[in-house]
């Protein structure tokens, strides 16, 4: 059996929404101290909708696939929905991750949480 699903490989090879969002009004960076991987999320929120989202991930293939899938899951969605995105939902959308790679999907959830927090605290009037 393949270790990684086809979806994981697809999002790793062709990650969606990679890059920097110059006019983001919510930005969050998180890292995992153990593996050293870092993820940065940029959100452009307007009228409580995630109008645009981009990410930069310095990390493993599962972290790249997780951030790519996470951006796809929240793009165009209400902020409320983005807030509820769990790492399990990200992993499920990728047709699963190996147990020891689940923390990579946690990084995606945390990066979005951090970006939303930044939006709440600093970004609303930007
Ligand atoms: Fe740490 Fe994937 S190995 S994020």
Image (tube, grey):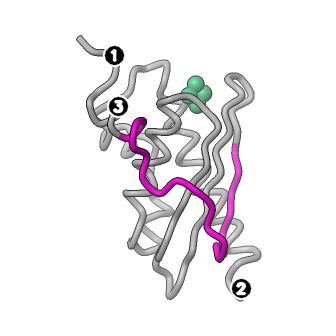
Occupied quadrant, residue 33: top right
**Where residue 125 sits: x, y (%)?**
71, 88
| Distance Cα–Cα, label 2 vs label 1 | 43 Å
Most frequent secondary structure within the magenta stretch? loop
Dot 2 alpha-carbon crowd within 10 angstroms: few under 14, some 14 to 19, many 20 or more: few
Occupied quadrant, residue 6: top left
| Distance Cα–Cα, label 3 vs label 2 | 37 Å
Of helix, strand and loop, which one carries label 3? Answer: helix
Of helix, strand and loop, which one carries label 1? Answer: loop
**Where residue 29 sits: x, y (%)?**
70, 51
Asked whether, in this view, residue 16 is left or right of residue 31, the answer is: left
Q: Where is 12 relative to 24, above or below?
A: above
Which residue was labeled with disc 3?
9
Which residue was labeled with disc 1?
3
Figure quadrant of the C terminus: bottom right
Which callout, 3 or 2, points to the residue nearer the camera? 3
| Labels 3 and 1 touching (C-beta < 8 A) | no
Dot 3 alpha-carbon crowd within 10 angstroms: few under 14, some 14 to 19, many 20 or more: some
Looking at the image, which residue is at 61% across and 56% down?
41
Q: Where is 82 relative to 126, above or below?
A: above
* Between discs 2 and 1, the one toward the N terminus: 1
The span shown in magenta is 11-30
Quadrant of the image where one finds ligand 1: top right
**Where residue 17 sits: x, y (%)?**
47, 57
Which residue was labeled with disc 2?
126
Looking at the image, which residue is at 45% across and 48% down?
68
Of helix, strand and loop, which one carries label 2? Answer: loop
Report the residue that reaches farthest toward the top.
1
Asked whether, in this view, residue 72 is left or right of residue 30, the answer is: left
| Labels 3 and 2 touching (C-beta < 8 A) | no
């Amino acid at each position: 059996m393949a270790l990684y699903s086809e979806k994981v490989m697809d999002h790793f090879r062709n990650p969606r929404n990679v890059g920097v969002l110059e006019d983001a009004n919510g930005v969050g960076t998180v890292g995992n101290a153990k593996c050293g991987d870092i993820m940065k999320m940029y959100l452009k929120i307007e009228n409580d909708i995630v109008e645009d989202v981009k990410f930069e991930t310095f990390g493993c293939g599962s972290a790249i696939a997780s951030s790519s899938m996470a951006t796809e899951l929240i793009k165009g969605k209400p902020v409320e929905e983005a807030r509820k995105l769990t790492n399990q939902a990200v992993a499920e959308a990728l047709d699963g991750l190996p147990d020891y790679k689940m923390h990579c999907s946690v990084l995606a959830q945390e990066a979005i949480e951090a970006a939303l927090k930044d939006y709440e605290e600093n970004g609303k009037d930007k």
